[in-house]
Image (cartoon, rainbow, N blue to C red):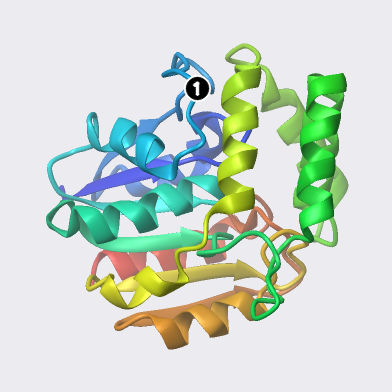
Amino acid sequence: GPDVLLLDGWGRHSGVWEDVIAALLDHHRVTILDLPGHGYSRASGSSHALDALTAAVLAVAPPRAAWVGWSLGGLAAQRAATIAPERVSRLVLVGSTPCFAQQPDWPHGIPLTVLQGFARELRQDCRAMLKRFIALEVHGSEHANAQLRRLKAMLFQRGEPDVTALEDGLAILEHTDLRAEMPRIVCPTLLLMGQRDQLTPAAAGEAMRDLLLDARLHVFLRAGHAPFFSHLAEFVTRLRAFLDE
């Protein structure tokens, strides 16, 4: 079937997609990747640049696929859609925006002091910081406690992520602003946001829709940063309808 590429978020591995994969395999060929330094993927050397991360993904991605990116993975997907549009047939951004840090003209992000605090905590106690980050991801979501237990159980199933890769990922989240590039994304785009997302506010979806040429937005009610956990059936329905258009 048509190729679909699934990219995970910061501090995670591609195992987070296991339920989504099961729902796609009857109609699609699915590729999952661990980002450099995450899961089974080795770190590819220190680089704070989103272009280096995107190049690493493009090097092993299918020749042409629908790219589904969650959080940090969504930044790589956005960048790929602008620098290699022939490789990205469709784009799905899950809890991902062009600019994760708040700006004077972009209130839809994380305060810079919070991102910098993450970096300090990471250097002090990596494992504790990752567990705290998971709690932020599920905060406000339906069945948050069950999701938190499951995500914690999955966190180190493929070993601990590389600390340098984690630091680089936070630097990408802190410094990247792709808003000016969004009008260059020509493929159909689906924006999937959680109503109660503490990291990428749902209001960012409306702002992004205005910047994109061909975009549609769906907000999952009572969902946090990981709607594919909290609202799996609804998530799969929206995703498959978009992929099969």
Residue drawn 65% across the image and 76% down it: 106
Where's residue 183, x and y in %?
Answer: 32, 78
In the depicted view, which residue is nearer to us: 49 or 23?
Answer: 49
Q: Residue at x 80, y 22 (%)?
A: 123
Residue drawn at point x = 55 percent, y = 44 percent: 172
Q: Residues within 10 Å of mark 1 (few under 14, many from 20)?
A: few
x then y, percent, for residue 21: 41, 41
Q: Say what secondary structure mark 1 lies in.
A: loop
Quarter of the rendering containing residue 149: top right
Is 43 drawn above or below residue 186 in the view shown? above
User: Is residue 133 found left or right of 6 in the rendered image?
Assistant: right
The mark tally for this picture is 1
Whether residue 125 is visible: no
Residue 146 is left or right of residue 85, and the answer is: right
Can you say whether 23 is above or below 180 in the image? above
- Which residue is the extreme one toward the bottom? 210
Quarter of the image where the C terminus is located:
bottom left
Residue 176 position in % (x across, y down)? 53, 55
On screen, residue 120 above or below 160: below
60 left or right of 147 in image: left
Residue found 53% across the figure and 77% down from its top: 218
Q: Report which residue position mark 1 lands on.
A: 46
Residue 139 vs residue 207, the one in the foreground: 207
To which quarter of the image does residue 50 belong?
top left
Q: Amino acid at mark 1?
A: Ser
**Where in the figure is residue 111, as x and y percent of width and height?**
79, 61
Q: Does the rendering let one see residue 109?
A: yes
